[in-house]
Amino acid sequence: MRWSAEVLRVCVACLSLCVSEISAFSQSLDSDFTFTLPAGRKECFFQTMKKDASLEIEYQVLDGASLDVDFSLQSPSGHVVATDYRKSDGVHEVETEEGDYMFCFDNTFSAVSEKVIFFELILDNMGDGEESEDWKAYVQGADLLDMKLEDIMDTINSVKSRLGKSLQIQALLRAFEARDRNLQESNYERVNLWSCTNLVVMVIVSGVQVYLLRSLFNDKRKTRT
């Protein structure tokens, strides 16, 4: 009976561990967004952060003339912690303080071209680690059946971190693919335009040449009878 009770206790601990990890996966702290920034406009976004956390912002211009935009990141105290001027992409990571961080994308330098912008936020050390330690309240005797629950927890956290990194890389690859596709479509339209222009010029030049050759052999002098 004592052995069965110990086995049941370990099973309950593992079950609570799985439940806590499932809830941790559902509350992801990574997010991405794609939006259209009109010409001559500036758009700002806000992210609430905790003290001693980590905020990483990565952005790319997917479509628009020159594929460039101005970027700025401002702390809750009003200090500008990162700026980019006329860049197509960028990555910024800061250690945060308590409050709302503001990051802006500025397209006021462009009068006619709108921009399609993708950005991703990665938030670390946001204080969700306390909930993940609740499983320890169900465990008494960590050496039962030669199982080290701390090692299991470390392994699951490593898997979670790698899955999050995989999702981040996939999002970036989709952004690269979208930007390359937009660039190829733009080049395709330019090639077609210049091809049609060259064709029209060639037809006009050919017509002028035919006219000039015919005028050279056209004898307009009158013959006497």
Image (cartoon, rainbow, N blue to C red):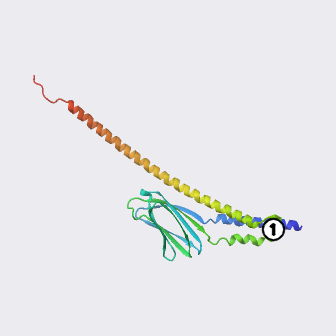
Q: Residue at x 61, y 60 (%)?
A: 165
Q: Residue at x 75, y 71 (%)?
A: 136
Percent x, y of residue 118 = 51, 60
Count of numbered tags: 1
User: Which quarter of the picture shows residue 199?
Assistant: top left
Q: Which residue is mark 1?
A: 143
Position above or below: 222 against 122: above
Left or right side of 199 for 93: right
* Residue that sits furthest to the left in the current view: 225
* Residue that sits furthest to the bottom in the current view: 77
Q: Quadrant of the C terminus?
A: top left
Q: Amino acid at mark 1?
A: Asp
Percent x, y of residue 207 = 28, 36
Q: Residue at x 59, y 68 (%)?
A: 123
Percent x, y of residue 47 = 54, 70
Percent x, y of residue 91 = 52, 64
Q: Secondary structure at mark 1?
A: loop
User: Which quarter of the picture shows residue 132?
Assistant: bottom right
Residue 47 visible: yes
* Residue that sits furthest to the top in the current view: 225
Residue toward you, 106 or 150: 150
Q: Pointer 1: residues within 10 angstroms few (<14), some, or many (20+)?
A: few
Q: Quadrant of the N terminus?
A: bottom right
Residue toward you, 148 or 19: 148
